[in-house]
Amino acid sequence: MQQLDYQLFQLVNGLAASISFFNPVMRFLAEDAEYLFYIGVIIYWFIRTESNRRMIVQALTAACLGLAVSGLIGMVYYRDRPFVTHVVFQLIKHAANASFPSDHATGAFVIATTIWLFRKKDGLVWLILAACIAFSRVWTGVHYPSDVLAGALLGIVAAVGVHRIFTSARLARRWLNAGIGLYERLEFKIWPQKLNKPKEEVHRS
């Protein structure tokens, strides 16, 4: 299995030499594209709809959970990065720390999956971006394919698990609504704008 993983790594990483004109794009995806997720989280939050607020709280909760589990896995099952044990085309600088699983893939997929659970069209775009980030981490020589696949799976499971908890557990929903409500009471004192609610909720109020 490890041999197959390395062969796949060589195939993808070798593209950095054979079609090098894509390297600047891959460098951006591997190093800086994660900031697009941060910007997206901020924009969705300050659109100030009830659905967006629930979505972002769930995304951040799932991200904390997923990255915590990723860190524990990295300590229990430590794996050197490809550039430590092999000659690779390394396009970006990176510390020689644990390679498995990929935190970049975990973080990207956990947020993208949460958005998909709330907004299918938006979520599909974010999932494609997450997949590009995961692929670029192999292309640039800092992860094996299994690292990013495991990270992606961990992110998806964390996002779906947290979403199910908040939608099926009454206590979790209460805590979620209470937390958002407390924040909004403080926010509205600074920025007094009525929260955009779904039409059916507006009619009931």
Image: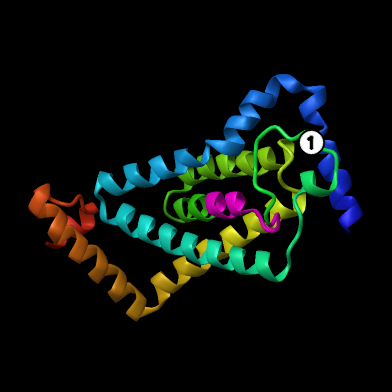
What's the magenta region?
98-109
The answer to which of 177 and 146 lies nearer the viewer is 146
Residue 61 % position (x, y) = 42, 64
Q: Is residue 24 left or right of residue 20?
A: left
Q: Is residue 108 left or right of residue 179?
A: right
- Residue at image x 89%, y 45%? 7
Colouring rule applied to residues: rainbow
Residue 203 can be seen, yes or no: no
Residue 173 is drawn in which quadrant? bottom left
The answer to which of 136 and 99 lies nearer the viewer is 99
Tell me the amino acid under the disc marked 1. Asn
- Residue at image x 58%, y 31%? 28
Residue 52 falls within the magenta-colored stretch:
no
Q: Which quarter of the figure is the N terminus placed in?
A: bottom right
11 w.r.t. 81: above or below: above
Residue 99 falls within the magenta-colored stretch:
yes
Residue 79 is drawn in which quadrant? bottom right
Q: Which quarter of the figure is the C terminus placed in?
A: bottom left
127 w.r.t. 53: above or below: above
The mark total stands at 1
Residue 37 can be seen, yes or no: yes
Q: Residue furthest right?
A: 3
132 w.r.t. 65: above or below: above
- Residue at image x 24%, y 53%? 198
Can you identify the residue that label 1 sits on?
Answer: 13
